[in-house]
Every structure is written in structure tokens, then in C-alpha cells.
Image: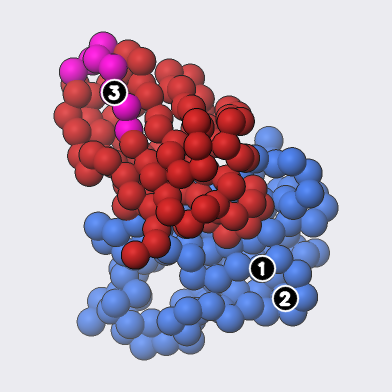
Chain colours: A blue, B red
Amino acid sequence: AQSVSQHNHHVILSEAASLELGCNYSYGGTVNLFWYVQYPGQHLQLLLKYFSGDPLVKGIKGFEAEFIKSKFSFNLRKPSVQWSDTAEYFCAVTPPGTGRRALTFGSGTRLQVQP
Amino acid sequence: IAGITQAPTSQILAAGRRMTLRCTQDMRHNAMYWYRQDLGLGLRLIHYSNTAGTTGKGEVPDGYSVSRANTDDFPLTLASAVPSQTSVYFCASSKEITDTQYFGPGTRLTVL
């Protein structure tokens, strides 16, 4: 079945460490890609998105993601994490122009940043 | 302030009872969605609506129904709640079906 995979379920980092969260999808063809973040007790917010163009996408709060079509990946990165980045991160995918109904989410990665 | 509101914030419900979760958006978005969030499973789409007057089934539609009488409102109904429907429910909307989705604050539902 077509899906979105996030291989890191729980990541613990110290402040100032670098972050990379993996996301792979199995859809063929052209896709739209998203990373959402859910801070404790809050609803989902968009971090960044890729529709087309430069495969390196800059988002809010210093996050970026790189779309590598040959690897079906859209990994999220941040050079130096802060305690306030503690949250759950969701990768999501939707193929445009196919009538696909909505986003398919990965299972999420819980990031815990220790001060 | 533009956005999505959901009601109630949380609810404890006896099994077998009927429950409607409300969702309203004021962004004039065409598309609306209902997801449930369960630990380790991420968000799964229950039902969606491309535009007012139309609805469709998502990944996990069984036991749920929706209606879209107008652009702003997209209620989700559990006709006869079961414990497996204990979850956090998020409503979302987007301008069109493949655009960025904006999420509401969620409804935490417990079915006993």
C-alpha cells in the first residue's frame, strides 16, 4: 500500500545538537510534501511545504527540508535545536492533480530536546 | 481572528450514544477534512469534503458520517459510539483539495 514512513519514532537531543528527521513516501509521480509540527497541547501547524522548484525548502523557526526525488525522501533538518523545539513532527504527502482526497500522514516523530 | 474552531474541546461519552463534533471555519476554504489522531498511527483521514454539498470517505470512515450544508461548517457524527472511537479528532480546511491544510485545536473524545 502507498504510505508515508517516518523511521524515527522518538528522538532525544541536547540543545544545540543538529537534527535530521527522516521521511519517505511510496507514491509514484509528482507529489506535494509537507512537514507539520504539534507542540505539546497544541494543534498542528505547518512548518514547511514543497510543491515544486528548488528542492531545498526553508520553513519557519530555522527548519529546512530537502526533497530528493530519486530517494522518495523529504527529510527535515535543523542545524541547532532549542528546548522549545520539543514537539511531535509529522511528514505528510499528497499527490496533486489525481483527485486524491487529502494528506496522508506519517506516524510522527516525537522530539525531546534536553536543556 | 480567522481560523478553525471545534467544539467541544473534550467529551466523555457512554458507548452507544450519538455524538456530533462541530467544526467551523471562516476562511472561505472550499475543502474540509476530519482526522483522528491515535498514538503511533499519526493522523488518519475519516471523511473529507471538496466543496459545499459534497463529501467523501477517507481512510477510516466506518462509524462516522459527515455533512456539508454550507462552506463554513463540517460536523462529524458518531451514530453509536464505541470505545475504539476514543481519540483526538482534528478538523482541517484548505483553499482547494491539494493546498496547505490548516488545523483546528482538536476535540478529545473518550468513549466508555
Residue of label 1: A50
Q: Specify whether residue A69 is in view.
A: yes
Q: Mark 3: few, some, or many residues within 10 Å (few <14, many ≥20)? A: some
Whether pointer 2 and pointer 1 mark residues with C-beta atoms closer than 8 Å, the reply is yes
Q: Residue A38's mark? A: none
Residue A28 vs residue A60, the one in the foreground: A60
**Residue B36: image location, x then y, percent:** 41, 38
**Residue A40: image location, x then y, percent:** 27, 61
Residue of label 3: B19
Task: Identify the magenta region.
Answer: B14-21
The quadrant of the rendering that contains the C terminus of chain B is top left
In the drawing, does residue B98 fall left or right of residue B94? Answer: right
Q: In this rendering, is residue A57 above or below A52?
A: below
Amino acid carrying mark 1 in the image: Tyr
Indicate which label's residue lies in the foreground, 2 or 3. Answer: 3
**Residue A56 colored magenta?**
no
Residue at mark 2 shares a chain with residue at mark 1: yes
User: Numbered disc 3: what chain?
Assistant: B
